[in-house]
């Protein structure tokens, strides 16, 4: 088990009466337990409320004006399921659980239909299964130069789609995740985006930035379960807290503003705690398949790896 102590602090200057919808609380899932949490909201706000989606994503809605500060503190325990990669297989569409079908379709940032020729050229001749998904993640890592300023709150221009990222050959973790998702969907493999806080394993060395930050992972559905992948290669899949789950960044944004507001300060922290007497261990890189989602029962056979 991994335990992470996290902080998200945001400060906004709200120019006109607006509503902030934030995804800054840990998701609720069978493999992620909230040990304790606290939300502090200061400033000119109306009545705040929240929502928990069926997938465990939590949204906080804040009517606001003027200066507003939001601080989310929490400690979570994460249980990782690890399986033998030789047992994991892609599943034919007729055998997939109905809940996974939305993650086969093109979406705003993941134009799998446009990328189908590229996916078939690069991976169409490879045997389907876990190894092919690993090859897709590796290909994205080799083709796209990781640039933490390419997406997210410090991006200079419009947010890029998977097609844009492939054309520019640069992207942040979100952009690289979108490209991997689109390639998987083009091969009829369900894939989705997971927004998270990364505990920093490998990030500081790769970017020269503070280790902890928001990060995007990919989840791919294999043999009845969602498995995590990081196409950037800088974050240990055992060292992240799940915040949101969705088809792409339109459904997993940390903040969506309805109105006019500017984020003037942002701080993210995630500290891994260790207690070997309670079997709480530090995050570690691994080549084994990692899942933090529940298994979904299936009845039809999968495609052999």
Image (tube, rainbow, N blue to C red):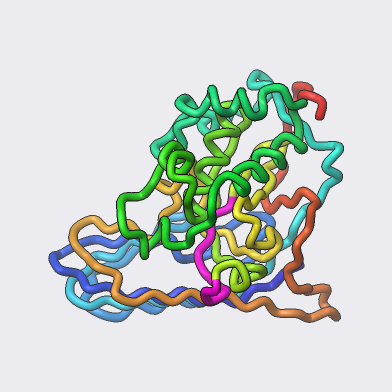
Q: Residue at x 73, y 69 (%)?
A: 283
Above or below, comparing residue 294 to residue 185 in the picture? below
In the image, 206 versus 223, the foreground residue is 206
Q: Is residue 177 magenta?
A: no
Residue at the top extreme, as displayed: 94
Residue 60 occupies quadrant: bottom left
Above or below, comparing residue 133 to residue 217 in the picture? above
Residue 54 x %, y %: 52, 46
Residue 75 occupies quadrant: bottom right
- Residue range of the region highlighted in magenta in the rendering: 208-217
Image quadrant for the N terminus? bottom right
Q: Residue at x 65, y 56 (%)?
A: 233
Residue 251 x %, y %: 42, 47
**In the displayed structure image, the side of residue 32 where residue 250 appears, left or right:** left
Residue 292 x %, y %: 68, 53
Above or below, comparing residue 161 to residue 24 in the picture? above
Residue at the left extreme, as displayed: 16
In the image, 69 versus 58, the foreground residue is 69
Residue 250 x %, y %: 39, 46
Instruction: Evaluate whether residue 37 shows in this view.
Output: no
Image quadrant for the C terminus? top right
Above or below, comparing residue 133 to residue 252 in the picture? above
Residue 129 occupies quadrant: top right
Instruction: Evaluate whether residue 49 shows in this view.
Output: yes
Q: Residue at x 20, y 70 (%)?
A: 14
Q: Residue at x 25, y 79 (%)?
A: 43
Q: Is residue 213 magenta?
A: yes
Q: How many marks?
A: 0
């Amino acid at each position: 088990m991994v335990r992470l102590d996290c902080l998200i602090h945001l400060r906004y200057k709200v120019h006109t009466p607006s509503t902030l919808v934030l995804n800054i609380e840990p998701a609720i899932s069978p493999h992620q337990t909230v040990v304790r949490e606290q939300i502090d909201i200061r400033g000119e706000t109306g009545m705040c409320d929240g929502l928990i989606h069926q997938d465990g994503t939590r949204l906080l809605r804040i009517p606001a004006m003027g200066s507003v500060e939001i601080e989310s503190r929490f400690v979570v325990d994460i249980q990782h399921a690890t399986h033998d990669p030789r047992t994991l297989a892609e599943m034919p569409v007729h055998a997939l659980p109905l809940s996974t079908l939305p993650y086969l379709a093109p979406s705003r940032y993941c134009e799998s239909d446009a990328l189908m020729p590229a996916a078939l050229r690069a991976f169409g001749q490879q045997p389907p299964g876990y190894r092919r998904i690993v090859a897709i993640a590796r290909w994205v890592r080799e083709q796209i130069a990781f640039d933490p300023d390419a997406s997210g709150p410090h991006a200079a221009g419009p947010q890029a789609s998977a097609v844009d990222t492939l054309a520019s050959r640069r992207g942040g973790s979100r952009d690289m995740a979108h490209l991997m998702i689109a390639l998987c969907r083009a091969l009829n493999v369900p894939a989705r985006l997971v927004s998270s806080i990364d505990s920093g394993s490998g990030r500081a060395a790769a970017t020269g930035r503070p280790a902890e930050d928001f990060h995007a992972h990919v989840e791919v559905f294999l043999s009845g379960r969602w498995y995590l992948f990081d196409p950037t290669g800088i974050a240990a899949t055992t060292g992240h807290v799940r915040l949101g789950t969705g088809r792409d960044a339109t459904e997993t944004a940390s903040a969506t503003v309805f109105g006019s507001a500017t984020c003037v300060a942002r701080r993210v922290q995630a500290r891994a705690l260790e207690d070997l007497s309670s079997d709480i261990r530090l995050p570690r890189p691994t080549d084994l398949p990692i899942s933090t989602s529940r298994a979904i029962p299936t009845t039809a056979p999968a495609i052999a790896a």
